[in-house]
Image: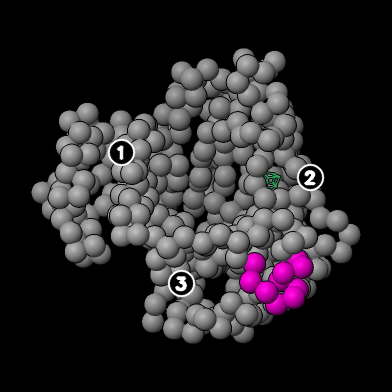
Amino acid sequence: MKKLSLYIHIPFCVRKCHYCDFLSAPPRENEKKEYVEALCGEIRREAAAFGEYSVDTIFFGGGTPSLLEQEELEKVMKALQDGFIIEETAEITMEANPGTVDRKKLEGYRRLGINRLSIGLQSANDEELKELGRIHGWETFLTTWKAVRECGFTNVNIDLMSALPGQTIESYTDTLKKILALEPEHISAYSLIIEEGTDFFDRFGPGKAEEDRLPSEEADRTMYALTGKLLQEAGYSRYEISNYSRPGRECRHNLGYWTGKEYLGLGLGASSLVGHTRFSRETNLETYLQAAMAGESTVVWQQDLSSRDQMEEFMFLGLRCTKGISAKEFRKRFSADISAVYGKQLHKLKSKGLITVDETGQIVLTSLGLDVSNQVFVEFLK
Ligand code: SF4
């Protein structure tokens, strides 16, 4: 049977964080209920085309999926179980924000088979959390963390961010140390990106009044290097540019994205890759609800990937992983020699010290390549 990953988007949050450009907003009255109904309908309809697949990872993302009530989540899980063949050992991840789950909810998750949590902490510093517009402080996170462990979750990610307004090397180091003391199985660490259309863009964007409150480029780089150093010293291995884990605790779902595995996204704005087609769904909640409730497709964009597109994705997604890509696998997938297609680019990157190629044809980013990965990826775009 072919393998499939499922992504389920839950677009609700308690309130909007100041830096956030994800598809999420506080729910209006009854909106969650309507959404769950529409989503379950979509799951059941779409599942019919996937009888030849078994699902080995499910990811509830958002938004804040932990805002769903237990009965709402039960309905979604039931629709998934009715529609898809879900493997017994499937990795089932739920994103949860501190303060939105308690023991009762967490026990409910375990009963439903959720076996991995991803907690959006971002910083251990209350001032920084307030600046970000997060709904929680460090103490709230600790209460959530205690409950998570007491309820027996042994595969947990903590999300962190660096290069925050007002953040210093010292405060970031303190955050890293506090997190490491908790020994999570997985840590995702990203630099803040100031996205257009967010409150942060109006305050900290190019030429805006508070731009100078962002750490300098040099401080940003120092924080980035510190992440790698402290986490690796503590026994985490970096398996992707921004992701670190204990051995065997890599996020299987995300690894699928980077290795070209098929996935089906369900819910508002969700993206999919099925066969050689990428497609994504309606991003306007009202339009989405109307279409899904009427039993219509919510797909609004679709692209059939040419063989060249697939090669590009193979290169720049695969190189995100520290394991890199294999020339043998390239040949197997595309019946072409990697050096015949990308020889020039590989030679250039190698001579700049950004990649290495070993005798088996395994191509990996060097530590310099990891630092300037965008410069590497751009080489493989048409
Ligand atoms: S909790 Fe996450 S998805 Fe929700 S507003 Fe904040 S950053 Fe965005």
Residue 54 seen: yes
Q: Quadrant of residue 314?
A: bottom left
Q: Which residue, given by chain and number where applicable, does mark 3 sit on?
A: 4
- Label placed on residue 15: 2
Q: Secondary structure at mark 3?
A: strand
Find residue 365 and name its label: none
The residue lying furthest to the right in this view is: 29
Magenta extent: 289-298
Dot 1 falls on a residue whose secondary structure is helix
Between discs 3 and 2, the one toward the N terminus: 3
Q: Which residue is mark 1?
A: 379
Q: Nearer the viewer, residue 379 or 164?
A: 379
Tell me which amino acid carries mark 1. Answer: Glu
> Where, quadrant-wise, is the C terminus in this rendering?
top left
Q: Residue 371 appears at what percent x and percent y?
A: 37, 32
Indicate which quadrant contains ligand 1: top right
Q: Where on the picture, by quarter, is residue 200? A: top right
CA distance separating discs 3 and 2 = 32 Å
